Image (spheres, rainbow, N blue to C red):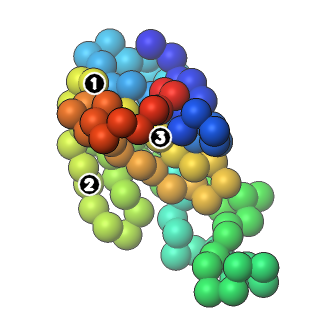
Amino acid sequence: MATSTGGTLSTTGLTTLVISNQMAAADIAAIAALIFDDRQNVPPNPVVGALNTPILSSVTAIPGAFTQNGLLYVPNRGVLKTFPGDIVMVDATAGWPILVSRQAINIGGTLWNP
C-alpha cells in the first residue's frame, strides 16, 4: 500500500500510510521526511498568536522519525510502536505526526478517508 491523502471527509490535508508488514521503503521515507522538530525554527505565528507555524524551507526532517520496524518518533515526546492496520498521518504544514490505532479509526461514527 502506498501513501495517500487522509483526514476527515471534509478536510484531507494529511499524508497517510496504513501500517502493514509490507510497507515500501519509499513510503516510509515519504512519511519520515515530513516529520519536523516542533521546537526548532518555529517563529510565532502573528495570525494565531500563541500557536506556532514552522518555516518549512528552514526546517529539516528528523533522521529516523519513522522506521521500517514501525517505530514512530514523535518530536520531543518519545517513540510509539505501530501495528498492522494502524494509520500514521502527518500534517505536512506543521510536520506533526498523528497515530491512530486500528481499533480507534472506525469507532464513534467518524468517517475517515485514509
* Badge nearest the viewer, 2 or 1: 1
* Three-letter code for the amino acid on which mark 3 is drawn: Met
Q: Which mark is residue 89?
A: 3
Residue 86 visible in rendering: no
Q: In this orientation, which residue lies closer to the viewer: 44 or 111?
A: 111
Label 2 crowding class (10 Å Cα cut-off): few <14, some 14-19, many 20+?
A: few
Q: Which residue is located at x 57 percent, y 74 percent?
A: 40
First in residue order: circle 2 vs circle 3: 2
Identity of the amino acid at label 2? Val
Rendered position, 95 above or below 51? above
> How far apart in space, not on screen, are marks 2 and 1 (Cα)?
18 Å
State the image coordinates of residue 53 (x, y, percent, origin top left): 67, 70
Q: Which residue is mark 2?
A: 79
Please, what is the three-letter code of the amino acid marked with disc 1? Gly
- In the picture, the disc for residue 85 is 1
Name the quadrant containing residue 21. Answer: top left
